[in-house]
Image: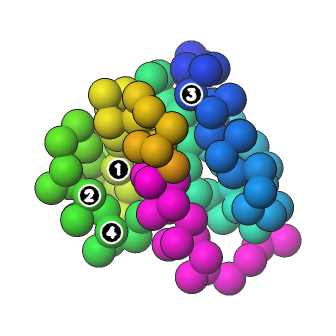
Amino acid sequence: MAYDESLAARIRDELAPHGYVTERKMFGGLAFMVAGNMCCGVTDSDLMLRLGAHGADAALDQPHVRPMDFTGRPLSGFVYVAPQATATAPDLRRWLGSALVFVSTLPPKS
């Protein structure tokens, strides 16, 4: 399982103040769980985001964003964001903020 350790460290730093965050190996990379719900992650060098159907559709209008498709069938509500769109701290923070907003609408899991 290969993923960008530097991006994972940046995500850890951004998510640290947002409550109960755990990590789990998923989707061939590393996923970050907030209150037990998958929020985001890293696969290869891409940021993986859970945005819900509406948020993912809106994100696909942005440059360097594509559907999350690792099996030949896109996963609804999830997108990949290429490194060009997460190069700066404000860019990464903005993307993670969108995922956190969506995940905050989900009930916590044990």
> How far apart are the alpha carbons under marks 1 and 4?
9 Å
Residue 68 is situated, as x and y percent measured from the top left of the image, at 34, 46
Residue kind at label 4, given as amino acid type? Gly
The answer to whether residue 71 is visible is no
Q: Residues within 10 Å of mark 4 (few under 14, many from 20)?
A: some
Q: Is residue 97 magenta?
A: yes
The residue that appears at 76% across and 73% down in the rendered structure is 109
Indicate whether residue 37 is drawn in magenta: no
Mark 4 residue element: helix
Q: Position of residue 89 (x, y in %)?
A: 51, 38
Secondary element type, mark 3 = helix
Tell me which segment is drawn in magenta.
94-110
Report the residue at 58% width, 57% height from top.
39
Q: Measure the alpha-carbon separation of dots 1 and 3.
A: 16 Å
Is the Cβ of the residue at disc 2 closer than 8 Å to that at disc 1? Answer: yes
Instruction: Determine crowd level at label 1: few under 14, some 14-19, many 20+ residues with C-alpha closer than 10 A.
Output: many
Which residue does the numbered mark 4 point to in the structure image?
55
Looking at marks 1 and 4 on the same chain, the residue that comes earlier in the sequence is marked by: 4
Q: Is residue 47 left or right of residue 77?
A: right
Residue designated by label 1 = 79
Could you tell me the amino acid type at mark 1?
Val
- Alpha carbon of mark 3 to alpha carbon of mark 2: how far? 19 Å
Q: Which of the image's four quarters has the N terminus?
A: top right
* Label whose residue precedes the other's in the sequence (1 or 3): 3
Q: Which residue does the numbered mark 2 point to in the structure image?
A: 59
Choose top left, top right, bottom left or bottom right for residue 69: top left
Q: For residue 78, what is the image quadrant?
A: bottom left
SS of the residue at dot 2? helix
Verify CB contact (< 8 Å) between mark 4 and mark 2. Answer: yes
Q: Is residue 64 above or below residue 105?
A: above
Q: Are marks 1 and 3 in contact (CB under 8 Å)?
A: no
Q: CA distance from mark 2 to mark 1?
A: 8 Å
